[in-house]
Image: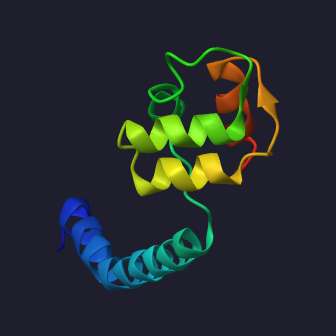
Amino acid sequence: MTSPQSRSSKQRDAKSPDSAKRNSHDDSRDESRGESERRIPNPVQIQKFPGGLDYPVEKEEILEKARSEGADDLVMEALESIPDRSYESPVSISHEVGKLE
């Protein structure tokens, strides 16, 4: 006679291949979805670069400052995508970047 514990372990083993297939299938969907979505830097990455500017500041000044400070491609892409207008503070810049999602 098979104990209930060994029976449930056999049932779990029998289910493993299917669940592994489902998990790998789900992962591939996540990967393809991630490639089509825009990557947005986090607010801390954005806040590093507009510091030291005299506000209000125009978008072009923000871009120049970020370039001169060595902002990475992700940050530059996000800053280039914000509306071309005057910004009152670093928070207003981060707020616009947050809308890009």
Point 44% across, 57% down: residue: 73
Q: Between 42 and 5, which is closer to the camera in this rendering?
A: 42
Placement of the N terminus among the 4 image quadrants: bottom left
| Left/right of residue 75 with respect to residue 84 in the rendered view | left
Which residue is at a point 56% across and 19% down the rendered structure image?
A: 53
Residue closer to the observer: 68 or 37: 68
In the picture provided, is 16 more to the left or to the right than 21? left
Q: Is residue 25 above or below residue 91?
A: below
- On the image, the x and y values in percent for residue 26 come to 49, 75
Identified at 52% across, 34% down, the residue is 46
Q: On screen, 17 above or below 27?
A: below
In percent of width and height, residue 101 lies at: 70, 51
Instruction: Name the foreground residue: 97 vs 9.
Output: 97
Q: Is residue 92 left or right of residue 34?
A: right
Name which residue lies at 53% across and 41% down: 64
Q: Tell me residue 28's x, y (percent).
A: 46, 81
Residue 81 pos. (x, y %): 69, 53
The quadrant holding residue 54 is top right
Q: How many marks?
A: 0
Q: Determine which quarter of the picture holds residue 33.
A: bottom right
Colouring chosen for the image of the structure: rainbow
